[in-house]
């Protein structure tokens, strides 16, 4: 089966062409992204519906659960349809208390890549993002050592393409001196726009920018302007917020997450939502 082309266009990361509206699998794990979901069949249904709707870019990580999300992806979708691309992250772990300690030592990164391969049922990973910063912002400092480990695994044929998560411009440039970077995943949405200049810089380099928490994260976006525009367009505020991101720059790829088929359909509908100039002007004032 070949994936449907969704409204909103496509973007090419290396040799991978993806619909700009993707899906983030974090919420398929249990509460607080820890342990199994309360309804595993519902989680499987969400993934299958996403692919049926035309999503061909799924974002995940083996530390969601841990392991749970990737195992559900494999259960739901393996053998994977032609054109479906799974992007994962390494650089963190989950401890017994559900915290997210960093895991950037060479052996930890190598083990994480092999764990992702095993749990997803793959021989090679399409894209691996190195996550190096804090919860919602970069931590300054060199990332050469961990990124070099991933570049070596890429040379061994275990990874097709490399990306970065929660990084600044200097860290991106440092990584690019080691190996090509096809995507950057940072905290960004209509109300949190510290990365505006970085979005434009990456667009000029044809590098994908993938905002995490595109709908505000654990505190959903709240804005009178957003609500007003949504009412006029007969859309939900969250769909408008996603559509704004698609309008913001051609290199932005979306990975909104949900454990609900109804919310999934609402999110995907944003790819077909056109924002008039006056609506964009109002929305741009939110930040």
Image (tube, rainbow, N blue to C red):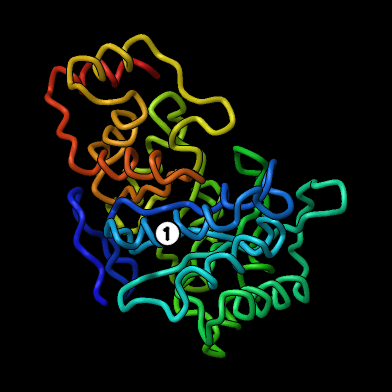
Between 110 and 151, the one lying in front of the other is: 110
Inspect this view and state whether residue 126 appears.
yes
Give the quarter of the image for residue 235.
Answer: top left
Does 210 sit left or right of 53 as displayed?
Answer: right
Between 134 and 123, the one lying in front of the other is: 123
Residue annotated with mark 1: 183
For the point 43% across and 23% down, the residue is 191
For the point 50% across and 60% down, the residue is 44
Vertical side of 55 occupied by 240: above or below:
above
Vertical side of 79 occupied by 191: above or below:
above
For the point 69% across and 42% down, the residue is 31
Inspect this view and state whether residue 166 appears.
no
Does 26 sit left or right of 63 as displayed?
Answer: left
Does 143 sit left or right of 56 as displayed?
Answer: right
Check the image and name the residue furthest to the right. Answer: 96
Name the secondary structure under disc 1.
Answer: strand
Residue 238: percent from left, percent from top:
36, 29
Residue 247: percent from left, percent from top:
23, 37
Vertical side of 190 occupied by 287: above or below:
above
Could you tell me which quadrant the C terminus lies in? top left
Residue 234: percent from left, percent from top:
20, 22
Could you tell me which quadrant the N terminus lies in? bottom left
Between 177 and 168, the one lying in front of the other is: 168
């Amino acid at each position: 089966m070949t994936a449907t082309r969704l409204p909103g266009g496509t973007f090419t990361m290396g040799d991978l062409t993806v619909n700009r509206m993707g899906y983030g699998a974090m919420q398929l794990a249990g509460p607080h992204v820890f342990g199994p979901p309360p309804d595993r069949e519902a989680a499987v249904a969400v993934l299958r519906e996403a692919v049926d709707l035309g999503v061909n870019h799924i974002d995940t990580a083996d530390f969601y659960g841990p392991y749970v999300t990737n195992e559900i992806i494999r259960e739901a979708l393996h053998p994977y349809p032609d054109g479906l691309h799974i992007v994962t992250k390494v650089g963190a772990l989950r401890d017994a208390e559900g915290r997210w300690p960093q895991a950037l030592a060479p052996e930890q990164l190598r083990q994480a890549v092999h764990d992702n391969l095993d749990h997803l049922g793959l021989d090679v990973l399409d894209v691996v993002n190195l996550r190096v910063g804090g919860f919602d912002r970069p931590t300054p400092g060199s990332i050469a050592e961990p990124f070099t480990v991933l570049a070596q695994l890429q040379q061994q044929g275990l990874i097709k393409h490399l990306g970065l998560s929660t990084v600044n411009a200097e860290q991106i440039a440092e990584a690019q001196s080691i190996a090509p970077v096809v995507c950057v995943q940072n905290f960004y949405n209509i109300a949190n726009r510290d990365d505006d200049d970085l979005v434009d810089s990456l667009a000029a380099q044809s590098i994908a920018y993938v905002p995490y928490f595109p709908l505000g994260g654990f505190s959903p976006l709240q804005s009178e302007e957003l609500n007003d525009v949504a009412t006029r367009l007969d859309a939900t505020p969250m769909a408008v917020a996603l559509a704004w991101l698609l309008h913001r720059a051609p290199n932005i790829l979306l990975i909104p997450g949900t454990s609900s088929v109804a919310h999934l359909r609402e999110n995907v509908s944003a790819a077909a939502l056109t924002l008039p100039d006056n609506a964009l002007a109002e929305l741009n004032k939110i930040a």
